[in-house]
Amino acid sequence: MRRFNALVFDDLIIGGASVLTPSRYDAGLGQFDTLSLHAIVDDIDVGGSMSVFVDHSGDGVHWYTKSAGSAVLTATLAAGVTASKTATEPAGELSMAFVRLRLALTTTGRARVRLYATGRDAAG
């Protein structure tokens, strides 16, 4: 059952460095069995790709990447074209108390990214 839905990131990203969702979402995102993500990427100036990783932590200080370090969502980007991509975390790996989303561009360009997260609880 859906328990949470929010726009957790809405900003311009410059390629070459990862960016994180604001820490105000860390405890809230950690409450759910499954996260589904929807990324909308526009104002792309150079083609490439954008990846979203799910990091989790027991204390909010030391972070570990879920899914064996693999991206949960990857979107192919083309200059001047809006990209829209959805993905859901793989089943089986439960999250610790705090969860953040890490976004990275594989280009030296820039793009505006809006990332929505939906939290679902299997228990209903």
Image (cartoon, rainbow, N blue to C red):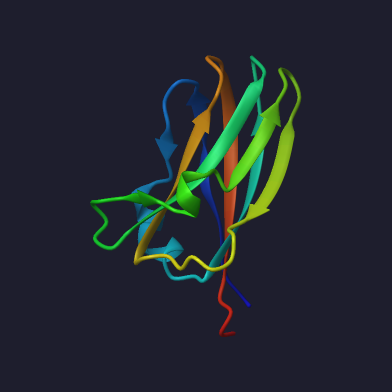
Front residue of 94 and 98? 94
Give the residue at x 50% y 53%.
67
**Residue 6 occupies quadrant:** bottom right
**Position of residue 82 measured from the top left corner of the image (x, y, whole percent):** 74, 30
- Specify the quadrant that holds the C terminus: bottom right
**Residue 84 occupies quadrant:** top right
Q: Up-down: is 110 above or below 124?
A: above
Give the residue at x 58% y 58%.
89
Specify whether 1 is left or right of 27: right
| Residue sitting farthest toward the front | 68
Give the residue at x 27% y 56%.
60
**Position of residue 12 measured from the top left corner of the image (x, y, whole percent):** 52, 28
Give the residue at x 58% y 29%.
112
Tell how many labels.
Answer: 0
**Position of residue 38 measured from the top left corner of the image (x, y, whole percent):** 65, 49
- Specify the quadrant that holds the N terminus: bottom right
**Position of residue 30 measured from the top left corner of the image (x, y, whole percent):** 41, 65
Specify whether 60 is left or right of 80: left
Specify whether 70 is left or right of 78: left
Q: Up-down: is 81 above or below 46?
A: below
| Residue sitting farthest toward the right | 81
**Residue 58 occupies quadrant:** bottom left
| Residue sitting farthest toward the bottom | 123
